[in-house]
């Protein structure tokens, strides 16, 4: 059976790479001049690898509330790898307060899922973006820009224009996982593909790399949810 895939061409790309997104779609990133036949040959040569990636059964941990269910008072939300209770309180404030639990003003109770999402986005800008700069300095690389994005099936990406994009949902993961994702994306500025050299770079700068990858495999579905 032929492998189904999507082709994304770019005039700035020099090498052909294949990625399997978390929704199991196969994407071929290719230089603009690469022929369809060449792409087919490369995909065919990677068929076994693609099969293993697309059929991998992830293990998901149970949450106190089903994924996608609107949060209600007394349930919990994940932040930096830990579950915290959500409480709706009477207050004149119009902002979420965090202190060993999430305190959401009663005036925002009807939209607590969206305001909590915005809270995560703001925390990501405060905590993740400065880390990109400091880790880039350690790696000795320069990036064009970094921003927080909303992407359900990718934790991060490094574009052909050397822009680093990081998913706000990473704020639900432990910090060592966030560090791993940042190093992973910045390492692409030194090595475009997932070669042995690439993994050596990531492993050198992320001592807990295997633990981080394992955490993402086991908790991926949790991060994919809006809250």
Image (tube, rainbow, N blue to C red):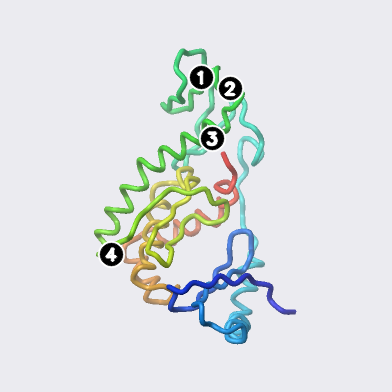
Image coordinates of residue 165 in percent, x first then y, are 43, 55
Q: Earlier in the sequence, mark 3 or mark 4?
A: 3
Res 71 → quadrant = top right
- Dot 2 or dot 3: first in sequence order is 3
- The alpha-carbon separation of the residues under discs 2 and 3 comes to 15 Å
Instruction: Indicate the quadrant where residue 144 lies.
Output: bottom left
Q: Residue at x 54, y 27 (%)?
A: 86
The residues bearing labels 4 and 1 have C-alpha atoms spaced at a distance of 43 Å
Determine whether, in the image, residue 101 is placed left or right of residue 50. Answer: left
Query: Which badge, 3 or 1, is on the more N-terminal residue?
Result: 3
Q: Position of residue 91 (x, y in %)?
A: 47, 13
* Residue labelled with disc 3: 77
Label annotation for residue 109: 2
Image disc number at residue 141: 4
Observer-side mark, 3 or 4, equals: 4
Of marks 2 and 3, the one in the foreground: 2
Residue 195, picture quadrant: bottom left
* Above-or-below relation of 82 to 27: above
The reply to whether the C-beta atoms of the residues labelled 2 and 3 are less than 8 Å apart is: no
Q: Cβ–Cβ below 8 Å for labels 3 and 1?
A: no
- Disc nearer the start of the sequence (4/1): 1
Query: Relative to residue 26, is residue 218 depicted above or below?
Result: above
Closer to the camera, 67 or 157?
157
Q: Are marks 2 and 1 in contact (CB under 8 Å)?
A: yes
Q: Residue at x 54, y 73 (%)?
A: 18
- Asked whether the beta carbons under mark 4 and mark 1 sit within 8 Å of each other, the answer is no
Q: Which residue lies under the disc numbered 1?
A: 105
Label 2 crowding class (10 Å Cα cut-off): few <14, some 14-19, many 20+? some
Quadrant showing the C terminus: top right
Is residue 128 placed above or below 137 in the rendered structure?
Answer: above
């Amino acid at each position: 059976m032929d492998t189904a895939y999507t082709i994304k061409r770019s005039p700035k790309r020099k090498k052909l790479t294949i990625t399997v997104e978390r929704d199991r779609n196969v994407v071929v990133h290719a230089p603009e001049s690469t022929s369809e036949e060449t792409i087919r040959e490369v995909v065919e040569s990677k068929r076994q690898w693609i099969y293993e990636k697309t059929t991998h059964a992830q293990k998901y941990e149970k949450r106190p509330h089903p994924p996608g269910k609107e949060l209600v008072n007394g349930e919990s939300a994940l932040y930096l790898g830990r579950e915290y209770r959500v409480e709706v309180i009477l207050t004149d404030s119009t902002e979420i307060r965090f202190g060993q639990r999430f305190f959401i003003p009663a005036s925002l109770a009807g939209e607590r899922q969206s305001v909590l999402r915005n809270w995560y986005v703001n925390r990501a800008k405060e905590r993740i973006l400065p880390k990109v700069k400091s880790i880039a300095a350690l790696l000795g690389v320069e990036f064009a820009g970094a921003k927080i994005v909303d992407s359900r099936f990718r934790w991060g990406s490094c574009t052909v224009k050397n822009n680093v994009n990081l998913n706000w949902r990473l704020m639900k993961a432990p910090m060592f996982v966030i560090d791993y994702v940042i190093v992973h994306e910045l390492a692409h500025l030194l090595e475009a593909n997932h070669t042995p050299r690439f993994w050596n770079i990531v492993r050198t700068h992320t001592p807990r790399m295997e633990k981080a990858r394992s955490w993402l495999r086991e908790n991926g579905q949790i991060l994919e949810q809006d809250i």
